Image: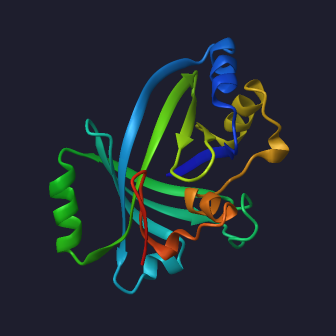
Amino acid sequence: MEEFEIKFLEVDVPELEKKLLTIGAKKVADYDYRIMLFDYSDFRMDKNHAWLKLRTDGKETTLSYKERIGVKNDVSIGKDDGMKEIEIVVDDFQKAYELIKSVGFVIKREMTKKRTRYKKDKATFDIDFWPQIPPYIEIEADSLENARKAAQEAGFDLEKGLICSASQVYMKYGFNPNDYSSMTSKEFIKK
């Protein structure tokens, strides 16, 4: 399944939340995520711009395969063609972690982030707060066209929209996530 989303960086969160409410979006929840990214020991998935992600907010845990589509290069942030995502809900973070490690995957990186989610119709507006970088919004819908329409309705200039991964956003701010084993609100640990 393809993920259809557009990112807009350095948002003014209070103003954005007012705008989302004005257009009729409803706040869903605030999340505090713990994220573990995995790869094979030879990092063959990374070479194909892919990874396995285990994520929990303490209530729901998901396991997903993600792969960037149409990658140009990391310098041209926001120019990818999209993201392939296959995601399932798992009932136990620790058991899923143990299973992933048991079949030979290694931890690529541990991360944390906070997220505030709004929804309107088929669009999801996720305001992401990653450590060490300014907040940004991801607008996701059932098609790229609908994500763009939702972005315009929320007042965003489509020319400033990015189709990229969170890792690429970090690179824009001078952090190469591949240099870190941990990028959490508590600490950044270099490999």
Q: Which residue, as the protein is rendered here, is positioned at the far front?
A: 186
**Relative to 49, is 94 on the left or the right?**
left
Q: Quadrant of residue 145?
A: top right
**Relative to 169, is 129 on the left or the right?**
left
- In this rendering, the answer to whether 59 lies above or below 155 is below
Task: Depth check: give the residue in front, 50 or 165.
Answer: 165
Task: Depth check: give the residue in front, 130 or 66.
Answer: 130
Q: Position of residue 126 (x, y in %)?
A: 55, 35
The residue lying at 52 percent from left, 68 percent from top is: 177
Q: Which residue, as the protein is rendered here, is positioned at the far bottom?
A: 42
Position of the C terminus by quadrant: bottom left
Q: Tell me, what colour scheme is on the image?
A: rainbow
Q: Position of residue 25 (x, y in %)?
A: 59, 18
**Relative to 28, is 138 on the left or the right?**
right
The residue lying at 74 percent from left, 71 percent from top is: 75
Q: How many marks?
A: 0
Q: Quadrant of residue 81?
A: bottom right
The residue lying at 55 percent from left, 49 percent from top is: 3
Q: Quadrant of residue 156?
A: top right
**Relative to 161, is 44 on the left or the right?**
left
Q: Position of residue 37 (x, y in %)?
A: 38, 64
- In this rendering, the answer to whether 113 lies above or below 75 is above
Q: Position of residue 143 (x, y in %)?
A: 64, 40
